Image: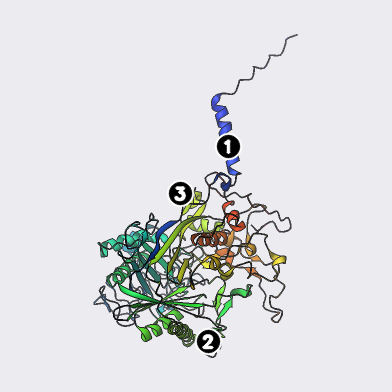
Amino acid sequence: MAQPPSSPPARPPTRRRLAAHLGIAVLVVLYFTPAPALGLGQGPPAVVWATGAAEGPLLAGASKVNITPYTEPGATSGPRTSSPASDPISNPVSNDDPDWTGPVTLSGVWGEIYGDANGNGRYDEGEAFTDDPASTAADPGSAGRWDGIYLAGYDADRVATGVVDPLWVRTIVLRNSPAGGGETGGSPGAGDSNAGQPGLTVAWATLDLIGVNSTRLPRVRAYLAEIAPGLDVDVILLTATHTHQGPDTVGLWGPTLFETGRWELYLDYVDRKVAESIALAAARLTEVEVTYGMVDPAGYPDLSGLQGRMGNRTPVFFDEELRVMGLAGRAAGTQVATLVNWGAHVESFPRESSLISSDAVDAMRLAIEEELGGVAVFTPADTGAVVLRKDNPVTLGTEGLERTRAIGRLLAEGALAALRAGSPDPGATFLEMRSKDIYIPLTNQSFRLGGILGIIDVPLYVADRWQAGSFLGSSVKTTMYAFRLGEGTFTTVPGELFPEINFGVDRHHREDMADVTTGRPFEPSIRDAQPGTYKFLIGYTQDLLGYVVPAYDYRIYGLPFVSGVGLGALMGEVPDPNAAVPPDPSRPDALYKEHYHEITSASSYLGPAVATTAAGLWGQDLTRDPSYREWLGSRSALFLLPNPFAHLHLDFEDPWVEHQ
């Protein structure tokens, strides 16, 4: 009987196979190892731009440049109302700037020429239009697509049809005197250069737009080098007033949810105007003294009832302070600039309005400039879930544009009252500044989809270093700043910060927290870490990453049983666990039903990242802070990729709700 053939002897594993198996094992171990275990994930160190104390003098200059995308029909491109050498001497609605070489529609609003077939005064999908070569050259992807002004902030497809008041870029340039002492150093970031030079120079531009993007800074610097070749600016700060009646500079409010509303030709024009505004302000540098002031409803009752919580979201808590910084020339005593900082969405126009406007901010600035002179600037504070109430006792009974202007005048009167009660700060002679680049895990995948489709421009990174594109990137990057000028301190935030994070979530949280909490730790208070008497919180600065929501109340749809993979707007808003319980028993019909703010937030880690970074910039030790440790532990040691199992929360009753 034949014997079956014997099987060949097993081959010993080769060195190559062993190395491959070992490599895979190492990668798996690294992926499930939290980054902090290996001392990773803290990002680059903070940059110290200037520190110490000095006698000064402090130098400051200010300017304003029109960026309204409107030219009155029949007007020509020159001569313009104001030349690049001076600010506008009036309040021009029509922008006749010869630097705008793009098309203008028959309504006067900038945009590609179209045939208004239905006579409604705006472009509609399907109507014939002339594709502008310059627009296509600026953005080849726009070929065959109508380019024009879509208004941002409410719904898609709001094409601008006219203008109520102009949009501006208003810039304050601050410079430490080279002879003033102190120490200057650091290394430049995305918007920074010339670090280490004496006499730190900071250009702070505030724009009447829905949001800004730090990716525009290299273009701004290129224009600045062209306009003012000898001007050295160390840091450029960009802040948006967040008007909902301005052009879509983000991309989310185009003709449909899946088409961008950004017009690259206009964005490039704005970049040039920012550079022009910086050059104008720097040309006017003069020795200044600084006066701070603050009013709130307790001391200035007219502010009472002006703020409300969006969608009945609790706690019903606001940053009620209206903070002011005045810069006046030492020699002549004339006002250089007045900066106002207050926390509410400036949204007084009806959402169906198609008119361009800076909203109530316009009337506020005009009233201040009429009283004091100089350039008035509005900066939004911690506006997360905070809206303007239309039943404020001072504005009650007014409607439409009358109400908008009444709100603006009310804010101006409060700011003027604050300055009158103040006195020059003798210690405000030297600007101290720190900054830090932070990389935040992208957990809202609708942002990734928006980048893939070309709707938004939010670069994604891997390993806190390399830009990797919308498909492969895992984190968003931004830069936060903390700076001090005497008794005034300033913290910048890249979005819409909920005020309870600023003032302390441990003290200001939902009364029903025990029933709804996600179990995540409270963020540290930014304000508690921030020194000084006047604590400015500057939102919408350098980037717009959406709402900065407290972690304990952050809810978004996600992949079942996986942490950190939110699906955002792709699946809609998550119902609140207490949606049937009125937050205020005296108003039984006022329910907080759904978590809207999370679907426009880039990350469930924005709250911890922003709060702990701000506190760290002001010197707080975060080693034992639970929120800080949670944020760092959200990523693995493998290229700092998000670890979807780092904070796994199994919820078999509702697996699609992403709690962590």
Q: Which residue is mark 1?
A: 26
Residue that mark 2 sits on: 302
Q: Amino acid at mark 2?
A: Asp
Q: Is residue 397 visible?
A: yes
Instruction: Quadrant for the C terminus, please.
Output: bottom right
Labelled pair 3, 2 in contact (Cβ < 8 Å): no
Question: Residue 199: x, y in percent?
Answer: 32, 63
**First along the sequence among labels 3 and 2:** 2
**Of all residues shown, which one is farthest toward the right?**
1
Q: Give the amino acid type for the residue marked by disc 1 in the picture.
A: Val
Can the viewer see residue 254 in this picture? no
Vertical side of 344 occupied by 187: above or below = above
In the picture of the structure, the residue carrying the numbered disc 3 is: 465
* 557 on left or right of 175: right
Number of the front mark, 3 or 2: 2
Q: Nearer the viewer, residue 11 or 487?
A: 487
Say which residue appears at 58% left-offset and 32% top-offset.
Answer: 22
- The quadrant the N terminus occupies is top right
